[in-house]
Image: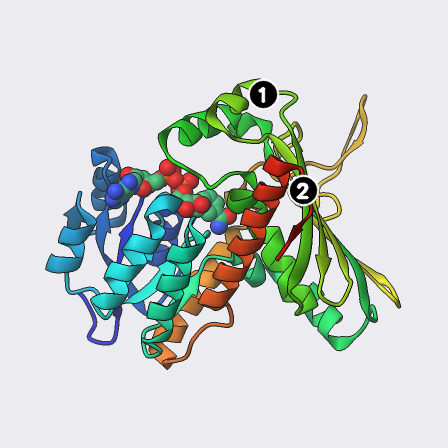
Amino acid sequence: MLLPTEIKLGIVGLGRLGKIHADNLVRNVPGCRLIAACSVVPEELTFAKNSLQVTELYSSYDEMLASSSIDGVVIVSPSGFHVEQITKAIRKKLHVFCEKPIGLDIPEIEKVVDLIQEHPKQIFMLGFMRRYDDSYRYAKKLVDQGNIGELSVIRCYGIDPSSGMESFVKFAKASNSGGLFADMSIHDIDLVRWFSKTEVKKVWALGKNAAYPELDEVGELETGAAMLELQDKTIALVVAGRNAAHGYHVETELIGTKGMVRIANVPEKNLVTIYDEHGAIRPTSQDFPERFKQAFISEMNEFVACIREKRQPEVTPLDGLEATKVAAACKNSWQTNQLIDL
Ligand code: NAI
């Protein structure tokens, strides 16, 4: 039975990440009820009905918005739909959680950011979940307290497991991810802005398809790197890839005038070390759902808490716009081999 105080939510997109968000909303986020789900894949709607007891199932987003009595929507559809779906939900007076990136086209994102800002009573949250990861939050506190002094360098690695390559090639053919920098480095770009509290001034990016030249055919990059200069001269190096043999490698290092902080130096799975004929082995996390399990739960709890407490989250729509501008500049730099000023 739906309690009168429960926030009623709908979700669009029940793919790789949508299923995780839906499951968290049902099992790990008190104070809300997932009553509606929308997907163009019938099996995913059956999953929502049978495994999550979602009662309202839609194959059309417009129909979900028109027919359901939801208070908010969680958008986990392919990135190319985000701007349109946010716009429709905001106009319908709904609260919105949207996965990253906020959109793929800068002028369209600027318009949707204006629209969101014209509706300050509706909560808008973007899925930069690393900001809700316990280790990143701990490191952020250290940096903000001045423990490592003034930042000089930020180094970020975000490399997907090679085991996901086959499904990625399928994903890339079916829908536009925005490219390596908008799809993956966007998290690292957000971390650079979050830790430094400074905007990016210049970027220079490079890329190489060594292990998977077939990615050339879909205009995608397997490995890319960007050097960023921030407005206060802090240097950031962002490496993104889709070919980590050992698992899911997300690592960040901050170098300051008084010390250094590293987050997930080795992307450890747990506290186990295996000693065998290969030596001492530390098992590593294998994919984003495993590494950021806690962060995905915490960010969704924050979204619902923001709705209940009538306050906006720390991560803003402008963070989405600025990070996307930097990612677009990286893509431009890679394609033109030019240093790009923002
Ligand atoms: P996916 O391709 O696995 O799933 C997409 C889902 O959207 C499917 O359920 C599909 O039925 C649905 N869909 C497609 N077109 C639709 C339409 N016109 N109307 C309604 N539903 C539609 O995609 P995945 O990997 O789950 O990614 C979804 C979003 O989440 C992307 O924007 C991606 O960038 C983001 N993402 C974020 C991650 C993070 O680390 N925060 C990790 C993975 C994805």
Front residue of 102/280: it is: 102
Badge 1 amino acid:
Tyr
- Say if 148 sits above or below 189 in the image: below
Badge 2, how many Cα within 10 Å: few under 14, some, many 20+?
some
The location of residue 139, given as percent across then percent down, is: 71, 64
Earlier in the chain: of badge 2 and badge 1, it is 1
Against 146, residue 153 (above or below) is above
- Residue at the location (17% across, 47% down)? 57
Instruction: Find residue 212 and name its label.
Output: 1
Left or right: 190 in relation to 258: left
Q: Quadrant of ligand 1?
A: top left
Q: What number of labels is visible?
A: 2
Compared to 2, does 235 lie above or below?
A: above
Relative to 132, 37 lies left or right: left
Give me the residue at 83% from left, 71% from top: 149
Note whether residue 95 is visible. Answer: yes
Residue 330 or residue 163, whichever sits in front: 330
Tell which of 300 and 254 is nearer to you: 254
Residues at marks 2 and 1 touching, judged by CB atoms closer than 8 Å: no
**In what element is the residue under mark 1?**
loop
Closer to the camera, 63 or 249?
Answer: 63
Residue annotated with mark 2: 338
Q: Position of residue 31 (x, y in %)?
A: 32, 70
Q: Could you tell me which secondary element the residue under label 2 belongs to?
A: loop
**In which quadrant will I find the N terminus?**
bottom left
Which residue lies at the image location 38% right of the left edge and 74% below the top edge?
117
Q: Quadrant of the C terminus?
A: bottom right
* Picture residue at 45% right of the left edge, 66% below the top: 317
